[in-house]
Image: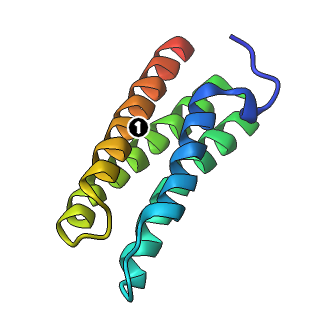
Amino acid sequence: MKFTNFEDILVWQEANKLIIEIYKRVKTGNDFAFRDQVRRAAISITNNIAEGFERQGNREFKKFLYISKGSCGEVRSMLYPARTLKYITQEDFDRFSELCIKIAKMLSALIKKLT
């Protein structure tokens, strides 16, 4: 498996879609701290994939993929209070949750391939 750019990595592309959706759909009113945290967690997924890739070593790349996976879990965890507080709809919760699970599985598969 050889990538030329981190943008070629499918899991990075999927995580980038999640960021865009989070930015568009999470409406928190004046709860800027929550909004900013969920955005930072989503962006952390792609940023860690990119940073790990750019270090040009499988060991370092794997380390950053694990961090990305953790950030994916953080986003998924934040979906629960977001739904309860009506910052997102049930439909958004379901879509984001499915996308987070898909991204986490893709990260796990990539980590396994690098082992």
Please determine whether, in this image, residue 28 is positioned above or below residue 58. Answer: below
Q: Quadrant of residue 105?
A: top left
Q: Residue, x 42% and y 50% (percent of image)?
A: 71
Please determine whether, in this image, residue 17 is positioned above or below residue 85. Answer: above
Residue 24: image x %, image y %?
52, 63
Quarter containing the N terminus? top right
Residue 3: image x %, image y %?
75, 21
- Among all residues in the image, which is located at the extreme bottom? 30
Q: Along the line of sight, which residue is nearer the eye, 61 or 106?
A: 106
Q: At label 1, which amino acid type do we have?
A: Leu
Q: Residues within 10 Å of mark 1 (few under 14, many from 20)?
A: some
Q: Quadrant of residue 62?
A: top right
Residue 93: image x %, image y %?
29, 51
From the viewer's perspective, is 100 left or right of 60?
Answer: left
Q: Residue, x 45% and y 62% (percent of image)?
A: 25
From the viewer's perspective, is 7 left or right of 29?
Answer: right
> Which of the colour schemes (rainbow, by chain, secondary structure, one colour) is used?
rainbow
Q: Quadrant of residue 56?
A: top right
Q: How many marks?
A: 1
Q: Which residue is mark 1?
A: 99
Q: Residue, x 75% and y 38% (percent of image)?
A: 54
Looking at the rendered structure, the secondary structure element under dot 1 is helix
Q: Residue, x 34% and y 34% (percent of image)?
A: 101
From the viewer's perspective, is 12 left or right of 75?
Answer: right
Q: Along the line of sight, which residue is nearer the eye, 45 or 90?
A: 90
Q: Along the line of sight, which residue is nearer the eye, 8 or 113?
A: 8
- Among all residues in the image, which is located at the extreme right? 4
